[in-house]
Amino acid sequence: MGDLKVFRVRGGRATEIPGTSVAVERDLQSLIEANMEAMLGIRFLATEYRTGRHRGRGRVDSLGLDESRTPVVIEYKRSRDQNVINQALSYLVWLRDHHHEFEQLVANRLGAEAAGPVDWSNPRVVCVAGEFTYHDTVAVEEIGRAVGSTWSLTGSSTTCSHCG
């Protein structure tokens, strides 16, 4: 798939809105986090969330909860990065091992009523990068089938959604 284009429609006429790139990954992350529900249909929960000292340690760029009450891990890379898929997969493993911690985050951030039943049947991973390789898209399709998760890749030269 070629570049994803965005249009403004006024008076029945569509005009392309030229795309721009961000100089720093953190700028992209901040923009999406501030508009996550409008852009992705995901309620924002946390940024740079620490995953602990042991297995799967690191920082999840963003955590969210989608409209189906499904946990979402979001990772950002400004350009092509061979580790974005591996990194996101390790955070998915962490998420599956830490249901209680995630549910507590939901309760703290959205309120006890919103923390109700979280749907753990098909956690989502969203990777946002300037570009993905062919091998990234193949890996995501296979991971979605094998792990039973939903992965989305969004970049300037690739848009791939696979529902496992």
Image: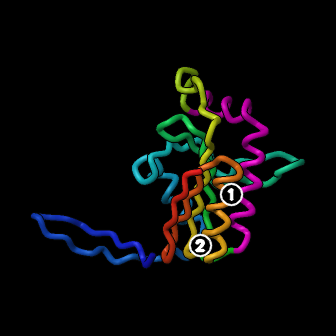
Q: Which residues are magenta?
A: 82-109
Q: What amino acid type is highlighted by mark number 1?
A: Ile
Number of disc labels: 2
- Left or right: 8 as drawn, with respect to 44: left
Question: How far apart are labels 2 and 1 at the CA level?
Answer: 23 Å
Q: Are marks 2 and 1 in contact (CB under 8 Å)?
A: no
**Residue 50 image label:** none
**Residue sticking out furthest to the right:** 54
Q: Which residue is mark 1?
A: 143
Q: What amino acid type is highlighted by mark number 2?
A: Arg
Say above or below: 156 vs 47. below
> How is this picture coloured?
rainbow
Q: Nearer the viewer, residue 140 or 66?
A: 140
Q: How far across and how far down the image is residue 28, in percent?
A: 53, 65
Say above or below: 97 vs 152. above
Circle 2 — which element? loop
**Residue sticking out furthest to the left:** 11
Q: Tell me the quarter of the picture where residue 126 sits.
A: bottom right
Circle 1 — which element? helix
Q: Which residue is at 60% across, 48% downward?
A: 124
Quadrant of image for the N terminus: bottom left
**Residue 78 image label:** 2
- Left or right: 125 as drawn, with respect to 54: left
Q: How far across and how far down the image is residue 94, in percent?
A: 77, 46
